[in-house]
Image (spheres, grey):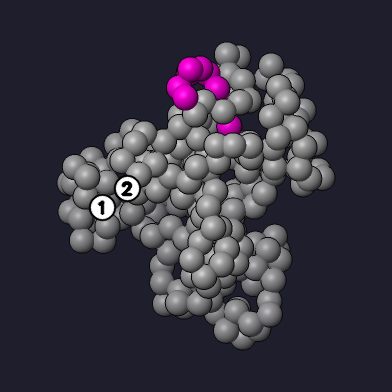
């Protein structure tokens, strides 16, 4: 199963085209984007890295582009993920947040509380069971990636929806890769050249260099130590 999954992902990364997942479910491989506040804690209370898509939302390029325009003086991160996801119904969108006791965690949350905050994805008030997509007000799309439906490579996993919670080993998305850079660099370049390609800025080391996860881990540790 693991060899089959790896071969499947290799095909997607090479051609970036829609096709069926192993098992026959219709899939797509796409780039999705997120702005991540930074510096902050490295992971939530359940061990999910905040730079990952585990139990998180992301947007398409159109929505991401609009968000970058106000980031010139921000310390936030701009992240592009390449993901593979099942696209058949139900494709319900879940809202994902970093929370503590049903309240959002943010810049005003104390470090003590922040360490106990947890990402959670909900479909209205219900548990989120599928990786979903929905149209965004003003154009573009939102995506949702519940952690429990993420392909990890375990031998028991299979590519299919688990909307009705009948198969705990069903998986409907996989994060293939990510590129992390400073959002402020994108904002500066877009101010100079509004028609600049955001994907090209991600793919080239200049003028916006990529940030290593080891470097970010050190920044997070320094942030926590200073509090």
Magenta stretch: dominant secondary structure: loop
Examine the rendered structure and indicate whether residue 208 appears above or below residue 152: below
Residue at point 55%, 41% (across, down): 91
How many marks are shown on the rendered structure?
2
Q: CA distance from mark 2 to mark 1?
A: 6 Å
Please name the residue that numbered disc 1 is placed on.
104
At mark 1, the secondary structure is strand
Q: Position of residue 33 (x, y in %)?
A: 56, 57
Instruction: Tell me whether the residue at label 2 lies in contact with that at label 1, contact meaning CB atoms closer than 8 angstroms.
Output: yes
Q: Position of residue 147 (x, y in %)?
A: 45, 34
Q: Is residue 86 left or right of residue 98?
A: right
Q: Position of residue 170 (x, y in %)?
A: 55, 22
Examine the rendered structure and indicate whether residue 78 appears above or below residue 2: below
| Pointer 2 or 1: first along the chain | 2
Quadrant position of residue 204: bottom right
Query: Is 117 colored magenta in this rendering?
Result: no
Residue at point 59%, 53% (across, down): 32
Residue at point 68%, 80% (across, down): 195
- Image disc number at residue 68: none
Whether residue 74 is visible here, answered yes or no, is yes
Residue range (magenta): 164-173
Quadrant position of residue 148: top left
User: Which quadrant: the C terminus?
Assistant: bottom left
The answer to which of 9 and 141 lies nearer the viewer is 141
Count residues near mark 2 (Cα–Cα under 10 Å), then give few for <14, some for 14-19, many for 20+.
Answer: many
- Image disc number at residue 98: 2
């Amino acid at each position: 199963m693991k060899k089959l999954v790896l071969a499947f992902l290799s095909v997607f990364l090479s051609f970036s085209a829609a096709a069926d997942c192993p098992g026959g479910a219709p899939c797509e491989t796409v780039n999705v984007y997120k702005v991540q506040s930074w510096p902050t804690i490295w992971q939530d209370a359940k061990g999910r890295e905040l730079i990952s898509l585990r139990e998180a939302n992301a947007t398409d390029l159109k929505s991401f582009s609009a968000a970058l325009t106000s980031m010139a003086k921000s310390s936030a991160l701009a992240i592009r993920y390449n993901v593979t996801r099942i696209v058949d119904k139900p494709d319900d969108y879940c809202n994902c947040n970093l929370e503590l006791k049903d309240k959002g965690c943010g810049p005003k949350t104390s470090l003590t509380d922040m360490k106990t905050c947890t990402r959670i994805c909900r479909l209205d008030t219900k548990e989120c069971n599928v990786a979903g997509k929905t149209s965004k007000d003003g154009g573009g799309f939102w995506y949702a990636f519940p952690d429990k439906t993420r392909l990890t490579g375990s031998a028991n996993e299979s590519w299919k929806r688990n909307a009705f919670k009948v198969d705990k080993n069903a998986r409907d998305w996989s994060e293939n890769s990510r590129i992390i850079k400073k959002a402020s660099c994108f904002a500066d370049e877009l101010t100079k050249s509004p028609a600049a390609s955001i994907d090209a800025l991600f793919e080239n080391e200049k003028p916006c260099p990529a940030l290593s996860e080891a470097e970010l881990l050190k920044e997070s540790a320094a942030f926590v130590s200073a509090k």
